[in-house]
Image (spheres, grey):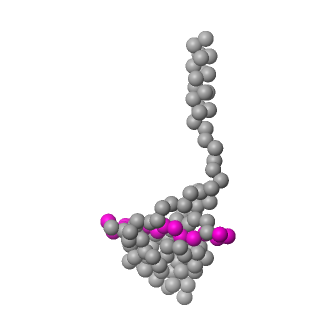
Amino acid sequence: MKLRVLSLLLFGGLAACATQPTSQTPVPASPRAGEPGNVAGMDASRIRVAFGAPQFVRKDGQVEMWRYDGATCKAFFFMYPNGNSMAVKHVETLPRPSNAAADSTCLQALLAHAKAAAS
């Protein structure tokens, strides 16, 4: 009898933990100060032209994170739906300055690398 009650409580608790997936991905708030304004809002196709193909793409629902690897840094572009395409909503680099989400020197180095690789 105790085993039956314990089983019912266990299954009931697991059922309460189940969540329904949502169809809409909420857009995050505006980025913190210091985010490079020249890439925020860029269309995905423009990012590919400027930086080339990302080394890694992660998809979470409708959101994508594109990672670009450089010799001394990494850049992460967070892409959200924008009409029929994707657009950059947020950019981070590693390493980054303490007062900004992304280091513009890193982004410039990645741009230069992509340009050199294309020629």
Give how far across and how far down residue 71 sits, in percent.
42, 73
Task: Tell me which secondary structure the magenta stretch mostly adopts.
Answer: strand
Give how far across and how far down residue 55 sits, in percent.
54, 68
Q: How many marks?
A: 0
The residue lying furthest to the front in this view is: 29
Q: Does 79 appear above or below 43?
A: above
Task: Kindly indicate the quadrant of the structure image that contains residue 109.
Answer: bottom left
Task: Kindly indicate the quadrant of the structure image that contains residue 80.
Answer: bottom right
- Please give the name of the residue rendered at 54% of the width and 75% of the height, measured from the top-left corner: 42
Q: Does the magenta stretch include residue 96?
A: yes
- Please give the name of the residue rendered at 62% of the width and 60% of the height, measured from the top-left corner: 62
Question: Foreground: 55 or 17?
Answer: 17
The residue lying furthest to the bottom in this view is: 119
Which segment did they paint magenta?
Answer: 83-98
Q: Does the magenta stretch include residue 66?
A: no
Give how far across and how far down residue 68 sits, in percent.
50, 70
Q: Does 88 appear above or below 10?
A: below
Q: Is residue 87 visible?
A: yes
Q: Quadrant of the N terminus?
A: top right
Question: Foreground: 77 or 16?
Answer: 16
Q: Quadrant of the C terminus?
A: bottom right
Question: Foreground: 53 or 18?
Answer: 18
The residue lying furthest to the left in this view is: 98
The residue lying furthest to the top in this view is: 1
Give how far across and how far down residue 73 sits, in percent.
41, 70
Q: Is residue 52 visible?
A: no
- Please give the name of the residue rendered at 53% of the width and 77% of the height, measured from the top-left corner: 51
- Please give the name of the residue rendered at 42% of the width and 71% of the height, measured from the top-left corner: 35
